[in-house]
Amino acid sequence: EHCSYKNTRPLLKGFPTRSPKVLVPAGEENAGVIDIGDGLAIAFKIESHNHPSAVEPFQGAATGVG
């Protein structure tokens, strides 16, 4: 998580980053990739636009309306 939101950072640190099932660790590239078996993998990515609202409420809210 590139913005380091204080409410999710501790939760994200709980995910494994090194394992035979971890194909691309979260934070190493744009998304983490996990081997789910049978030749399949799943990518996880999240992006939030809440941060601008915390810094500048009026203009930050405009990021959500386009």
Image (cartoon, rainbow, N blue to C red):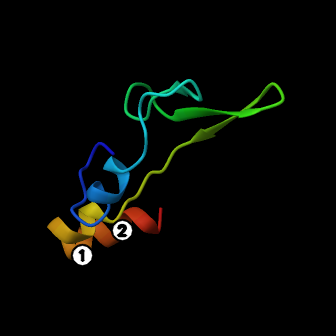
Labels 1 and 2 touching (C-beta < 8 A): yes
On residue 47, the disc is none
Identify the image quadrant of residue 41: top right
Please tell me which residue lies in front, 62 or 9: 9
Seen at 26% across and 70% down, the residue is 53
The residue furthest bottom is 58
The amino acid on which the numbered mark 1 sits, given as a three-letter code, is Phe
Q: As displayed, is residue 30 above or below residue 52?
A: above
Residue 34, above or below 59: above
Q: Quadrant of residue 52?
A: bottom left
Q: Callout 1: 10 Å neighbours few (<14), some, many (20+)?
A: few
Image coordinates of residue 31 in percent, x first then y, are 50, 35
The residue under the point 15% across, 66% down is: 55
Left or right relative to 66: residue 4: left
Q: Nearer the viewer, residue 65 or 30?
A: 30
Identify the mark at residue 62; answer none if there is no mark.
2
Residue underneath mark 1: 58
Quarter of the image for the N terminus: give it. Answer: top left
Position of residue 20 measured from the top left corner of the image (x, y, whole percent): 56, 23
Three-letter code for the amino acid on which mark 2 is drawn: Ala
Q: Which residue is more in the foreground, 7 or 13?
A: 13
In this rendering, the answer to whether 13 lies above or below 16 is below
The furthest residue to the right: 38
Q: x and y percent of residue 27 in the render?
A: 37, 33
Query: Local crowd at mark 2 within 10 Å, few (<14), some, or many (≥20)?
Result: few
The residue that appears at 39% across and 25% down in the rendered structure is 28
58 relative to 24 in the view: left or right: left
Q: What residue is drawn where x is 36% and y is 51%?
A: 12
* Secondary structure beneath label 1: helix
